[in-house]
Amino acid sequence: MASRPQGFGLTRELAMKTAGKYSDSDESEIIAWFSDLGISSGPDNRGMDGFQEWLKDGTILCALINTLAPGTVKKIHNTKTVKMQALRMNKEYENISFFLDGCTKYGLNKSDLFQTVDLYEGCNVPQVQMTIFKLGGMAKKKDFAGPAIGVKIASKNERNFTDEQLRGGQSIIGLQMGTNEGASQSGMNPYGQTRQIYNAREAKHLEKKGYAYGSRFAGSINTVNSENN
C-alpha cells in the first residue's frame, strides 16, 4: 500500500479534496480494460492506494501504450530486479516518462497528461485515471482494433477562408460591441428648444380654441396663461 504524508491545514484539505475526486467505477473500468487487453489482471488491493501502487513502476503503463502503438517504448525497465532503492526509483520515473512521451506521440495534448509525481507520489491519482481514459478515447479515434474505454476524441474541423473573405469580415461589427440598429430620435425635442412640460389645464384650453398641444404651442404658453388670468 502507498504511504504518503497527509500534511496539515490547507495542504491536508487540498489532499482530501483531490482524493474525493477518485472514482471507484473508473478504477473498475480501467482494470477491466487492461485485463481484456491481456496486460494485467489488476491490483492486489482495490482503492486509490492499491491502484497507485499497481501502476507506480510504470511497466504496466508502458505495456499499454505499446499495445495501442507497438514499438512506442523501445525498452521498459524491469525495476523488480534493481536492488538499490535510489536506482530503482530512477528507473520507475523513466518508465512513467516513457509512457507520457508515448501518449503525446499518440496524439494526446499535454494538458491531458498527469505529472510523474501525480502517480509516483500519489499527489493526484484521479488525474492518472483521466489520462488513461483520454488515451482510450484517442484509441477509438484511431480505430484501434481491440477494446477501448473513454469517449472518442473528435477530429478537428478546420476551415479555410480566402483573403477576400477575411478582409470582408474586418468591416463587420459584432453584436458584442453593441449596435444602434433601431435607434431613432423621433419624438425628441429639437436641439436648443426648451423641454415642454405637459399641463392638462392648458392642453384642454387650447383644444377649445382649436390649437394642438405640442411644439407649435411652445411660443404661446405665456399667452394662454395671461388669458387664464
Image (cartoon, rainbow, N blue to C red):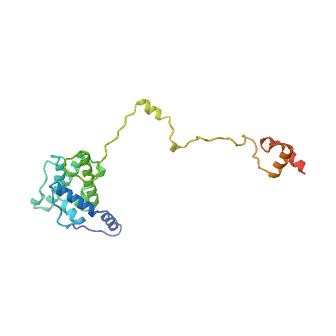
Which of these two is toward me, 9 or 191?
A: 191
Q: Is residue 95 left or right of residue 225?
A: left
Q: Quadrant of the N terminus?
A: bottom left
Q: Residue at x 31, y 46 (%)?
A: 154
Q: Residue 127 falls in which quadrant of the image? A: bottom left
Residue 53, image x, y percentages: 19, 63
Q: Is residue 73 left or right of residue 131?
A: left
Q: How many marks?
A: 0
Q: Is residue 164 above or below residue 9?
A: above
Q: Is residue 216 left or right of residue 3?
A: right
Q: Residue at x 30, y 65 (%)?
A: 19
Q: Residue at x 22, y 62 (%)?
A: 52
Q: Is residue 164 above or below residue 143?
A: above
Residue 221 seen in the current view: no
Q: Is residue 173 above or below residue 196?
A: above
Residue 119, image x, y percentages: 24, 59
Residue 20 seen in the current view: yes
Residue 85, image x, y percentages: 14, 62
Q: Residue furthest top?
A: 164
Which of these two is toward me, 174 or 122?
A: 174
Residue 188, image x, y percentages: 70, 43
Which of these two is toward me, 204 or 115?
A: 204
Q: Residue at x 35, y 67 (%)?
A: 10
Q: Residue 192 falls in which quadrant of the image? A: top right
Q: Is residue 177 left or right of residue 113?
A: right
